[in-house]
Amino acid sequence: MRLLSIYLLTGAIILLTVTSCKKADLLETNTDPNSVSVDLFDANNILTATQLYYTGSTDNAIDVEETEIQGAGCFIQHWASTSAYFFGDKYLFSPGGWGSFFDHAYTTQVKYAVDLYTNTIGKEQYKNLHQISRIMKALVFERITDVYGDVPYFQAGQAYHGSVYFPVYNKQQDIYTDLLKEVEQATDSLDQNADKPKGDVFYTGSNDQIAAWKRFGNTLLLRMAMRLTKVDPATAQAYVNKVQGLTMASNDDNAIVKHGTNDPLTINRIYRGIGGDGAIQLSGQISKTFIDFLKNNHDPRLPVLSYVYPTDFSPGGPTNGGSAAPADQAGLPNGYDAGTTSHGIINFPGYLGNTNLYSRPGTIIFNNTAPTLILTYAESELLLADAGARWHIGDAEAHYQNGVIAAITSLSAYGDAGTISLENAQAYYDAHPYNDAKGLEMINTQFWAATFFNEYEAWSNYRRTGYPVLMPVNYPGSQSPGAIPHRMAYSTVDKQVNLTNYNAAVSALTGGDKITSRMWWDK
């Protein structure tokens, strides 16, 4: 103790001596010239990361490969496969696949979205960036809760900022109430006279970035409100009325991420997850349900969206020698395996003899630099058409026509090879005009067609509306026999590390943590 007292006394004397130095000199001496503090760091860089991670993780895009494509994409019958990798084709048990999006979304998308939000609060130089951070945060969480139901929300992403390591799961109703409030306030608070955020991947090169974000925010608000059509139609209608005339006005307003080549952060995630893995690329085909819809309606999107690879194709090899001709396209039926039982594909009437002869996503849209369409004018117009048909808010027919034509012409985002002329799009609409007696079915079937590759959104809109009419599969071992799944089961990782909060969330689910359990808005 005496020795300790001597050290303390000596230290005090030294400290008193040092304080006679100028404070500025002391700070300069003890500051790492290579360090970057929160005050010096440009938060615009976090916006770039948040937007890129929204398209999927850099972990070989495993979350996109498993939960979105092999799961939701098969549920919604955009994709099909005889391989067990594609568990969603037959609603098979796949805890890792079900929870992959949960695991990766919280460690990347939520992390960056919350960082962006937290680091821009109350900073005048980031006035608009903070409002955009609120919109981005809502965009991220909407998809997470739409996939799983009740999830960590209010405490999520607070491990660093608030030392919250085991966040509680919040009720989906409470989450949606806050999402709507956040997006509404943020969109209304965007200021033309304030900052113009740099590093904005969605609206790089926009003629009016802040106006574009206002339209994006109001369109997102429309989408979120329309989720409530079954459970809270009064609130849905109120928001639809609010955003009339304020949503996206043309394909120029589409939010698009343009991807790079092979960098893990910039590559197209669907291609990285499915096309970048040889075995997986050969295992996945387009569903017969989707191909038949396009073929039977002489849809001009068919040769852009689908392609039959050459018979000698090997992963990583050239794709020339195949065919995009509409007559050559064939969709693989859902619900079959590669075996010889009654569920084997060899027993399907009209089987082509080889699964490689069935259509896969076209090379125009399926490559490492293909863009990702985040939220589009076509979706906006079809949602407004739904509101018109459902509640007589606005002109359902006019919005439907706008949505159909916009969906077809929006493929120009993939370059000249994806461009379909306005004349051809109009001709398609003229051949399939709006019929009020079948309005909701037509509108939401076209929404399904417009969201190929945006599988979470296609699945959410199906659960909301029941359209398009799909024939569920019934396969041995199915976790949802004869019924398209209503949700994904939670992460097995979070079950291990956050068990108390996980158990509380599961106890609120009718039927437990199953893919057959319904979430709040899926009444």
Image: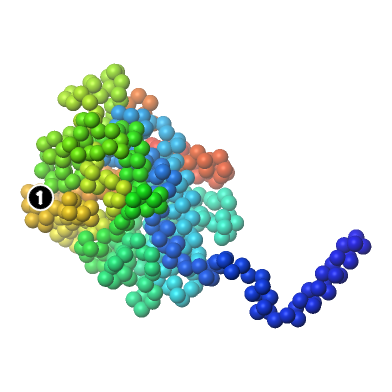
| Residue found at x 92% / y 62% | 2
Q: State the image quarter where residue 352 is shown.
A: top left
| Residue found at x 31% / y 56% | 258
| Residue found at x 23% / y 67% | 245
Number of residues whose C-alpha sits closer than 10 Å to that of mark 1, classed few (under 14), some (14–19) or many (20 or more): some
> Where does residue 175 sit, x and y in percent of width and height?
44, 55
Q: State the image quarter where residue 67 is shown.
A: top left
| Residue found at x 42% / y 37% | 97
Task: Give the number of callouts.
Answer: 1
Amino acid type at circle 1 is: Tyr
Residue that label 1 marks: 428
Residue 171 shows up from this direction: no
Q: Is residue 49 left or right of residue 167?
A: left
Q: State the image quarter where residue 253 is shown.
A: bottom left
Residue 285 shows up from this direction: yes
> Where does residue 174 sit, x and y in percent of width and height?
44, 55
> Where does residue 10 sit, x and y in percent of width and height?
85, 70
Q: Is residue 389 left or right of residue 281?
A: left
Position of 311 relative to 216 (above/below): above
Residue sitting nearer the eye, 251 or 180: 251
Position of 456 relative to 309 (above/below): below
Position of 35 relative to 473 (above/below): below
